[in-house]
């Protein structure tokens, strides 16, 4: 399968703190991949580097065959990378409909905007909430709304930073179903996640980051059985 | 041909439907009947008032463009700017310089008005470009824009010497420029001179109506959607693939062009412009008008500005410093009691009562 994302020798330090220490990472098109690791391992920083919010000190990022290392965030998004943040990055004072319209208005030329918005209201189970200010939705609904908005840019790669943080078990299961649905539509998914049950639900392969480096990579079973991973991360997962 | 007619008809309908939308208060027949009645009453006003009072009302209308422009920049795009007076003053001087050089014949004053607005708008575009592409954000925008208007004021105040002239136009330093012609409309049998009175009033009323409706359409368009989204969460907007800097720069330039329109019209109205029009007090007043009315709604801004201006003028009779203190008090009351603006608060309350009455 072709590689949609290829990261080579990515390095970033803030003073003495190294958040990416020569990361080499690649992702096949159509993958569902999770990134795990202890707090401070550099997971969110890795996302920020992919999104262009941090400029790397060294290394390259190739996306869909092009070097995007020097591009600004919005230019990377236009190339087909999208993101859902850990804290819902929605427009809280605007209605659910307005949130979706802003996300979809530039990217759905084949279908009318209102039809697309209807489709996404169904997808997120938010039909009936379209006029509700997004800020008063439940936490889980806000997360789903942001996932729908992230899909608005017609991404090839969707980055999700702890998509189930603060969700109930039911909401978590439903989020997993949503992501499988998006993946079946051809969107490659890379998620940072702490909830190992959720990782098992969605990921075919898992990468473990530690001190800004790739510590291990494999299937979920290989990662769970990995003694080093047990020691640095899974053993302390319940704190 | 039929297809093209249908699609252009449908485009026009889409365009007109944007007169209403989530970004602007007021919708439905009752609202538009109220707007029509208000416009008709304003049009009938010169029939019952004397020419001086009508000229004075025209003076109020002149400032509404600057206020509506600030509403776009501050209320909708979330960028607090103290710099509206810079574009106001620049366009005011530009109108003076152009008309003193070209004269008033053949409708050249209208050309001067257009050029002054273009100059003011372009200056806003350049300032906006350097600010937003230079990553200046938040309170620093206020500091930079205030500095720009104060620098312009200081510069113009030192242009008293005879060497400070552009063609026939002497800049005259702190005393300001005067003697430029009012607006003239070319007409059969002689130009119509728009002195402060009914004729200028009607031109301004027409401009206010067109600007107000045009801004409603713009604010409910895709561009307006992105502006309010930037106000709410610029980071998310960038992560939806929009170039936030471009949108902020355009909003700043559009708002600046409206301030420039006010400036050029002000000079044409009073045939006079001074550096103090770009000073600290002048820079602060638009903030008060827009905040008191309700910066996040163009209708509230329009109504609020006219009411506050009329109140300010009434108070000025008792002393201009006294009126300024009241303006400061009004701003404080707004911030503490109705941060969304007094007109917005009143309109929301009316809407609630109306809906309760209906149910």
Image (cartoon, coloured by chain):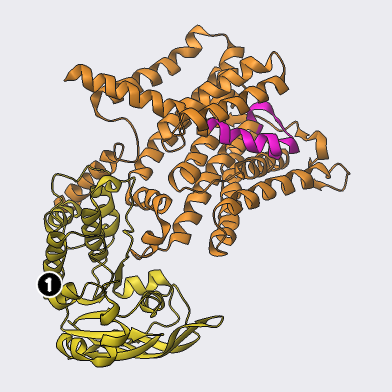
Chain colours: A yellow, B orange
In this view of the protein, which residue sits in the foreground, B37 or B321? B321
Chain name for mark 1? A
Tell me what residue is drawn at x 50 percent, y 13 percent: B46
In this view of the protein, which residue sits in the foreground, A1 or A235? A235
Question: From the viewer's perspective, is B204 left or right of A66?
Answer: right
Which residue is the site of mark 1?
A: A180
Q: In which quarter of the image is the C terminus of chain A?
A: bottom left
Question: From the viewer's perspective, is B224 left or right of B341?
Answer: left
Residue B41 position in % (x across, y down): 41, 15
Q: What stretch is highlighted in magenta?
A: B267-289
Residue A145 position in % (x across, y down): 23, 56
Is residue A71 visible to the viewer in this orientation of the structure? yes
In this view of the protein, which residue sits in the foreground, B343 or B4? B343
Q: Few, some or many C-alpha atoms within 10 Å of disc 1 (few <14, some 14-19, many ≥20)?
A: some
Residue A230 position in % (x across, y down): 26, 86
Is residue B189 visible to the viewer in this orientation of the structure? no
Tell me what residue is drawn at x 32 percent, y 55 percent: A90
Using the image, determine if residue A14 lies above or below residue B253.
below
Tell me what residue is drawn at x 49 percent, y 47 percent: B254
Residue B272 counted in the magenta span:
yes
Picture quadrant of residue B308: top right
Question: From the viewer's perspective, is A93 left or right of B211?
Answer: left
In this view of the protein, which residue sits in the foreground, A153 or B57? A153
Tell me what residue is drawn at x 25 percent, y 20 percent: B354
């Amino acid at each position: 399968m072709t590689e949609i994302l290829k990261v080579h020798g990515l390095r970033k330090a803030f003073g003495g703190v190294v958040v990416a220490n020569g990361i080499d990472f690649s992702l096949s098109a159509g993958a569902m991949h999770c990134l795990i690791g202890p707090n401070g391992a550099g997971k969110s920083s890795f996302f920020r580097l992919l999104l262009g919010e941090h400029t790397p000190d060294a290394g390259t990022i190739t996306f869909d065959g092009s070097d995007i290392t020097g591009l600004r965030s919005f230019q990377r998004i236009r190339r087909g990378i999208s993101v859902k943040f850990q804290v819902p990055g929605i427009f809280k004072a605007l209605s659910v409909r307005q949130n979706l319209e802003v996300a979809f208005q530039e990217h759905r030329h084949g279908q009318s905007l209102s039809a697309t918005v209807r489709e996404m209201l169904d997808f997120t189970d938010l039909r009936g909430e379209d006029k509700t200010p997004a800020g008063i939705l439940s936490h889980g609904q806000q997360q789903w709304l942001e996932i729908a908005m992230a899909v608005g840019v017609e991404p090839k790669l969707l980055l999700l930073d702890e998509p189930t943080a603060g969700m109930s078990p039911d909401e978590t299961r439903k989020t997993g179903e949503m992501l499988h649905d998006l993946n079946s539509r051809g969107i490659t998914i890379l998620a940072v996640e702490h909830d190992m049950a959720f990782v098992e639900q969605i990921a075919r392969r898992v990468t473990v980051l530690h001190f800004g480096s790739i510590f291990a990579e494999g299937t979920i079973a290989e990662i769970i059985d990995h003694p080093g991973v047990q020691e640095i991360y899974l053993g302390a997962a319940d704190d | 041909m039929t297809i093209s007619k249908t699609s252009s008809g449908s485009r026009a309908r889409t365009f007109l439907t944007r007169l209403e939308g989530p970004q602007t208060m007021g919708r439905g027949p009752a609202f538009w009947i109220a707007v029509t009645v208000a416009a008709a009453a304003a049009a009938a006003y010169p029939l019952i008032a004397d020419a001086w009072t009508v000229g004075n009302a025209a003076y109020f209308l002149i400032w509404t463009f600057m206020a509506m422009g600030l509403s776009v920049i501050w209320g909708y795009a979330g960028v607090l700017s103290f710099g509206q007076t810079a574009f106001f003053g620049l366009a005011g001087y530009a109108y003076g310089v152009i008309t003193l050089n070209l004269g008033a014949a053949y409708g050249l004053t209208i050309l001067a008005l257009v050029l002054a607005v273009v100059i003011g708008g372009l200056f806003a575009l350049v300032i906006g470009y350097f600010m937003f592409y230079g990553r200046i954000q938040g309170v620093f925008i206020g500091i930079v824009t205030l500095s720009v208007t104060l620098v312009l004021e200081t510069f113009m105040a030192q242009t008293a010497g005879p060497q400070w002239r552009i063609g026939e136009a002497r800049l005259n330093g702190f005393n300001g420029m005067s003697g430029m012609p009012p607006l003239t409309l070319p007409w059969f049998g002689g130009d119509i001179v728009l002195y402060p009175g009914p004729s200028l009033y009607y031109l301004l009323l027409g401009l206010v109506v067109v600007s107000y409706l045009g801004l409603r359409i713009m604010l409910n368009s895709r561009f307006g959607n992105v502006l309010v989204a930037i106000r709410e969460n610029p980071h998310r907007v960038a992560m939806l693939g929009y170039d936030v800097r471009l949108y902020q720069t355009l909003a700043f330039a559009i708002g600046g062009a409206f301030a420039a329109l006010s400036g050029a019209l002000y000079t044409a109205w009073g045939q006079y412009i001074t550096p103090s029009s770009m000073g600290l007090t002048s820079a602060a007043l638009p903030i008060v008008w827009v905040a008191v009315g309700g910066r996040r709604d163009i209708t509230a801004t329009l109504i609020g500005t006219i009411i506050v201006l009329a109140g300010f003028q009434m108070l000025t009779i008792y002393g201009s410093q006294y009126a300024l203190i009241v303006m400061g008090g009004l701003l404080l009351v707004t911030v503490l009691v109705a941060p969304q603006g007094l007109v917005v608060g009143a309109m929301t309350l009316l809407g609630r009562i109306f809906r309760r009455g209906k149910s």
